[in-house]
Image (cartoon, grey):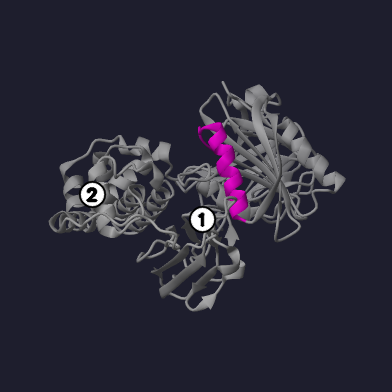
Amino acid sequence: MKRIFGTLGASVILAAPLVLGAPLPNRVNQGAVLTVGQTSQEMNAFSSSKYSFWDARVLALFWGAPVSQAKAFMGRTVLTGGQSVVDLDHKLTTARSDAMNQTQQLRLFTETYSFQDAETLGRFWGERSTWDAKLRTERKLILGDQQVVNDALAQARRTAAPPPPPPNNTPQDGQVFSLLPMPAQMTGTARPNFQAQFSSPPDRRTLRFVVDQIDHSREVSYSSSGQTIRWTPSSDLPPGNHVVDVSAVGQNRETFATHWTFTTPQATAVKPPPPVFQPTGMSVSNLGPGNVLGSRFSVNGRGIPGSTVTVQVEYPKQDVISQLSGVMLRFQNQGRVDSNGNFSIPMDAQEVPRGQPMIITVMDSANSPLVSLKTERGADNQIQPDSGGVTPSSSLDQFYDRQNNFGLNIQPGWVRISPSPNMVFKVSDHQGSTFEVGVGPARNPQQLINDSIMELNRQNNRVNSQTATKIGGLSATRIEYSSNNSNTTGILVTCVTGRNQTFLVGAESTHLNNSSVRRDIDAMFSSFLINSR
């Protein structure tokens, strides 16, 4: 589930032209950031930076914002420096890739050149048609090569090249475009995705796809039209320069051939994950996220001698509407840290119904960082855990997310775990099955479905069915699929709500045919509630 839904989250719910998950810069959210006024300092920083007008124009198209606001954002990023500039380079690469996939819209060409310019360039470049000249010009503008176009146009006008001779029956050269990784660019990863699109479907028997003199032709996947090939290496490429050669013969005997280079970055040290608790001066030693607690328990830890420690417990009322509207009940208790730096605060949770979540917040009078834990009220005789391990629930856990306006019943034996990147919720039965939720800004429902299917196909999955359904009382689309590389099968439900939100709710399993697993997953889909008002 992590492999598929992590990518879906980054591509579909977010900025890329694909499917699932959240709060990174997407077209809607980034546009909101860009509405802040521009300053002369930001514009000057942009003007003196390595970025060009066409970099700003491509980002502005990608975000749906004016060029001036894109320039200000880029200038602000240059002033910030550090990782922000690296992130901006990644955004620019994504924006260029998105623009390359939409070259047929001619968004940059039509605002810069005329039909007569395209005719002149087509004759000068030897293109088969004026349309091909427009596409070539569009790609060069996306890459910031306007000077190349202007030089070619000026030289063509000086030489007044005669029109090409009428076509004959000899085979013509085909075009290969939409190349990934971007030619002559630094990738953001040592394991990039490769792509090449042909102007017409190539004969697969003649395809040669070679990276650094190694033939990977049998490993590529094809789009449904047969015009696009894709490949992802199974391991990281070494840092440095790399060479890609693609050639084929078309079904109409046209020939395809292209060659490009790109660079992968030097490996960077992987930062260790932060510890679960990082308080300064105060820490909790006996509880952790996901613990199931009895009616009476204690919160133990270490703190600054003499300081007061307050433990507050919040829990929801049992009805769903109260949860989605944010109604919480709470109680608390206090104690002092002894001279040895230890504390133990007894808590009585008899008023909390069994099976309900409890948010435990620990704070002290020394202004140490808060410690907040999501736990569950278990049986009266529940044994208090000694560490921060997760204890699966033996009863239904009603989960509510007030920020994203949804809730559901987590089935017994399923435990919340860290969600995939860009997702907001994930549970697992620790036996090969997961259930995950992604939330993002509203999108066109049909485009959301199309992008979801495209991303599933790109990851070498087979879509088995697509049906209309309902989730949370709202109209949705249910997509069932299976992996071509393993025994993993999955269900993906897409929905756009009246709150201008996109929901992607999915389940994956290596044993979805198991009646118990299927029953749990169906129950979580059925209990899913969306507050769309």
Residue 62 x/y as whole percent: 38, 43
- Please name the amino acid that badge 1 sits on: Gln
Mark 2 nearby-residue class (10 Å; few <14, some 14–19, many ≥20): some
Distance in Å between CA atoms under marks 2 and 1? 44 Å
Whichever of callouts 2 and 1 sits on the residue coming sooner in the sequence is 2
Tell me if I can see residue 269 in this picture. no
As for residue 451 lying within the magenta part, the answer is: yes
The front one of 19 and 297 is: 19
Residue at the (31%, 38%) spot, across then down: 34
Is mark 2 in CB contact (under 8 Å) with mark 1? no
Read off the residue under disc 2: 53
Tell me if I can see residue 94 in this picture. yes
The number of numbered badges drawn on the structure is 2
Compared across the picture, whether 418 is left or right of 186 comes to right
Residue 402 x/y as whole percent: 57, 31
Local secondary structure at mark 2: helix
- Please name the amino acid that badge 2 sits on: Phe
Tell me the number on the disc at residue 278.
1
The front one of 328 and 121 is: 121
Residue at the (62%, 31%) spot, across then down: 406
The residue furthest bottom is: 213
Tell me: residue 36, above or below residue 138: above
For the C terminus, which image quadrant? Answer: top right
Which stretch is magenta?
A: 439-459
The residue furthest top is: 533
The chief SS type of the magenta part is: helix
